[in-house]
Image (spheres, grey):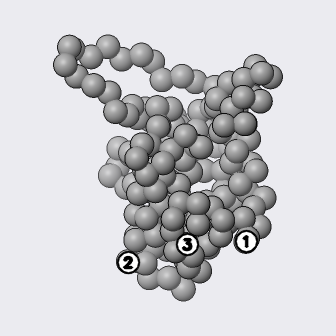
Amino acid sequence: MLLNILCDRLGYGNNHAIRLRLTIFAFMDIGERKELLKSHKLRITNCRLDVIGLFLSKSRALSQADLETHFSTYDRVTLYRTLGSFLDVGILHKIPNEDGIATYGLCNETCSSEEHVHSHIHFKCTSCGEIAYLDDNQVPEIKLPVGYQVNMVNVLVAGICVNCSA
């Protein structure tokens, strides 16, 4: 919450608060990662500490296959359950993908086990496959018929990223 207030006062808006929060997360030591798990009422395991550490060190979305490649010491089921527990408590959110392969990104501070707030835009590079947040873009307002209620909006923009276009 403090990051949102600070970024609002500086004129950066909520998207920069999310980026700043993720930058701070990247510098978390093992004790702070344990506290993150405890604050979400998750049991502390080596797998959970390692997986959250990988997400915190990357500036992009990760798939289960990315985790399996990076962590040969953990089996597929353990990683799947770890992702599921992080989704359930609001540490991660699932990013829909047109090819059916789920990717996951860190949630912002407004997420909890009761409510995930993810109305933002992702960009997928059609060359390298990397998925990133588009920080300075707002999801357009969607007008629904009477009686419909929006729970979440997912927008995936496809194109060539800055690294591949260089």
The numbered mark, 2 or 1, whose residue comes first in the sequence reads: 1
Label 1, label 3: how many angstroms apart (C-alpha)? 11 Å
Which numbered disc flags the more N-terminal residue, 1 or 3? 1
Separation (CA) of disc 3 from disc 2:
13 Å
Q: Amino acid at mark 3?
A: Arg
Neighbourhood count class around disc 2 (C-alpha, 10 Å): few under 14, some 14–19, many 20 upward: few
Q: Nearer the viewer, mark 2 or mark 1?
A: 1
Label drawn at residue 74: none
Q: Which mark is residue 30?
A: 1
Given residues 48 and 74, the one toward you in this image is 48
- Indicate whether 56 appears above or below 161: below
Q: Is residue 28 above or below residue 111?
A: below
Any part of residue 37 in sight: yes
Report, in whole angstroms, how far the alpha carbon at label 2 lies from the one at label 1. 24 Å
* Residue 77: image tag: 2
Residue 115: name its quadrant.
Answer: top left
Q: Nearer the viewer, mark 3 or mark 2?
A: 3
Residue pointed to by mark 3: 48
